[in-house]
Image (cartoon, rainbow, N blue to C red):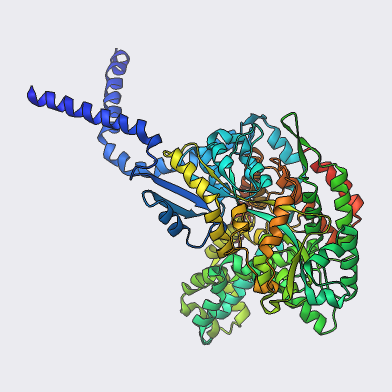
Amino acid sequence: MKRFQSLVLGAALLATSALAGCGSNNTAATSQDTTLTVWARGNSVPNDVETILAKKFPEWTIKFQNIPDVEDKLRAALRSKSGLPDVVIMGGSLPSFFQVSDQFLDLSAEAKASDATAASLKAGVTLDGKQMALPTDIGPWGLFYRADAFEALGYPSDPEQVAAKLDSWEAYSKLAEAAAASGKHACDTAAQVYQARLAQKGYAYVQLKDGKEVNIADSPISRDAFLYAGKLAKDKTCANVKPYTPEWNAATTQENLIAFVGPAWEDGILKKAAEKQSGAWRVATVPGGPVATAGSFVTGLAASKFPDAARQLAAYMGGSEFQKAGYLDKGLFPSSKGVFADPEAAKPVPFYNGQDTLGMLAKSATDAPSVYQGSNSTVVSTQFFVAMTDIANTGADPATVYQDLLKTTASK
Amino acid sequence: MTLMTRPRTRPSARQTLKQRSVWTYWREYLAISPFFILFAVFGLFPLVYALYLSTVSWDGLGKMTPVGFDQFIRLFTSGEFQSALSNTVVIFLTAQVPVVVAALGAAALLSSRRLAAKGLYQTLFFLPQVTSIVAVAIVFQSLFSNEYGIINSGLQAVGLDKVPWLSTEWGTRLVVSIMIFWRSFGYFVVIFLSGMSSIPPSLYEAARLDGAGSLRIFRSITIPMIWPTILFVAVTGTISGFQIFTEPQVLTNGLGGPNDSVVTMMFLQVRYMGGTTQTVPTDLGFATAIGWGIFAVLILLAAINARVMGKRRKEAS
């Protein structure tokens, strides 16, 4: 009997402790058994991410997983509701996850304490006002150009003077035509020019009306930008080479590409392709005004066993210290204004002949209008991008192509 | 009376036998159960689920919208699948068919006893199979790019015009076909070589003594003797040829080439599954319907293959 009693007592104790364990999981953020899993693409975090996180949160076990197709994996995990990470860094397709925002943590308190630019923070807010993600890097755009080639064409070489001279897209067209006449190119692909013009107006095919997304693919903003860039493509004024392709590298290495408008992260491919042209390149403001597009975001999963810890970790990864490491290691342009003012980051860059490119692009990031990205903005944008490439290849009439595109995109 | 008694006794005997057969052989059932469990989990369940998915419209995250047979109607009426099927057939005919014929010829040459450094040739031919497809795509982009490609630079150096390889429909298809040819050649050579190695050398010696030439030996001894290998290559080559995806995907960075000229059936399915380059809104329902379309095409091809090859085999024997 005594044996039976002790068995019952033992089982009750075990059950109580197990239940207590379940109940206390959510608040055990600082306990030693806190284990967090982080998913991200390797190229969207600093080199020694595991060391940085372990040093910052020594009491937790943080497992970092490098996942190249992180959005696809996250979708699959959300569908099966298993194998989810605690924290994830994802790219520009964040708006497609807004419809399941209940599966993510609300980072409103962390956003209030964040020093990220207003536009980048806004990009992580869902339709119902939930701060689902915090920005970890952003893409302010610049006009990258070779000073010596500009001088040869009779243009100034100083970034401020270049910005003053090329203050409109009409002025940029004249430059691109002059460059093409001399056998060089002042734009890589017309599709990038088109994208810059749209972002400059805070346009991404969708707008919010009474809290709902409305398709505005057929808009004067898009039409003007498409016809302008379409002319550059049709006339073969641009080099017709897409960034991140061997062609783009060849055009740059062979010194045929002397300027282009592009996001800050293209600094990485430029430095590699134009290694021998170090000191010749500069960055100026994009013609027509500042431009910035979304980069990467960090978010926490609601299914996390340690939501408080996940929030703290997400806030740290969206903060200045972590972003500074990403900028210094991989040129990931920070959204944190704290990094803009950091002397270790904001310093002369030899490749740009000692120009403080961070300071220059930070101004664009701060002044650029916020772009509302709808759930299908990326899809429509890709279709316009492909159409622009087709114009460059076939010489088709931009106005006709635009009208044809609207048949498929105006309803998405 | 006999008729009355028999039914009473025999069912009970059957029942006992049934009970015995089920419970006495539980060990045997247990032994073979892993296959059936795995088949049910990874084969049967996905099939049933795919059937269900093809009746809904779903972006993979939000709510599913039941649409009945609309996805199949869309499959037959939108023109996307037909265009993808036509692209697949063109690429198959210009890549998979020539590579099998060329590999057969190369294997015959390599199996010659007089050829030196056979191992080196086999290694060189097989090397593309183990090369990273991403690296291969970068090399092909560098070779065939319109403005700064190595081939176009070469053409211009000898006074010829540039060829718009990657900006025309025919050019992009041709480059994809060359990529497939280059990658698959070694694999088929190895398969044919293994088939040829099983032919007894005495047959060749006898044929030579009878005065047969190389072509006659190839036609009358090699081909009939490796007929099962040819059948295997024909079936697997056709199935893999109609599932072409990686080469066009990596070469065009997921965009599908000019006017979607290299969007094959599998490419189209992955596109609707929400691939990394989003050119269409994700719809897993339509992607599944495309999957059923591919399945139907492959079944049809396998049946044609079996019929044609079976007929030829009979003729040969």
Tell whether B163 sits left or right of B111: right
Q: Is A215 located above or below residue B199 in the figure?
A: above
Q: Quarter of the image holding residue A25?
A: top left
> In the rendering, at what x and y percent does residue A349 appear?
65, 70
Q: Residue at coordinates 85% horizontally, 42% vertically from top-left?
A: A219
Q: Could you tell me how many numbered marks the image carries?
A: 0
State whether residue A1 is above or below residue A110: above
Q: Position of residue B301 (x, y in %)?
A: 64, 51
- Closer to the camera, A228 or A291? A291
Q: Quadrant of residue A172?
A: bottom right
Q: Residue at x 80, y 77 (%)?
A: A148
Residue B287 at least partly seen? no
In the image, residue A62 above or below residue B237? above
Q: Residue farthest to the left?
A: A2
Q: Quadrant of the N terminus of chain A?
A: top left
Which one is nearer the viewer's eye here, A273 or A334?
A: A334
Q: Which image quadrant: the C terminus of chain A?
A: top right
For residue A204, say whether it is visible: yes
Above or below — where is A85 with respect to B16?
A: below
- Horizontal and vertical percent for residue A4? 12, 24
Q: Position of residue B117 (x, y in %)?
A: 51, 85
Quarter where residue A12 is shown: top left
Q: Nearer the viewer, residue A79 or B136?
A: A79
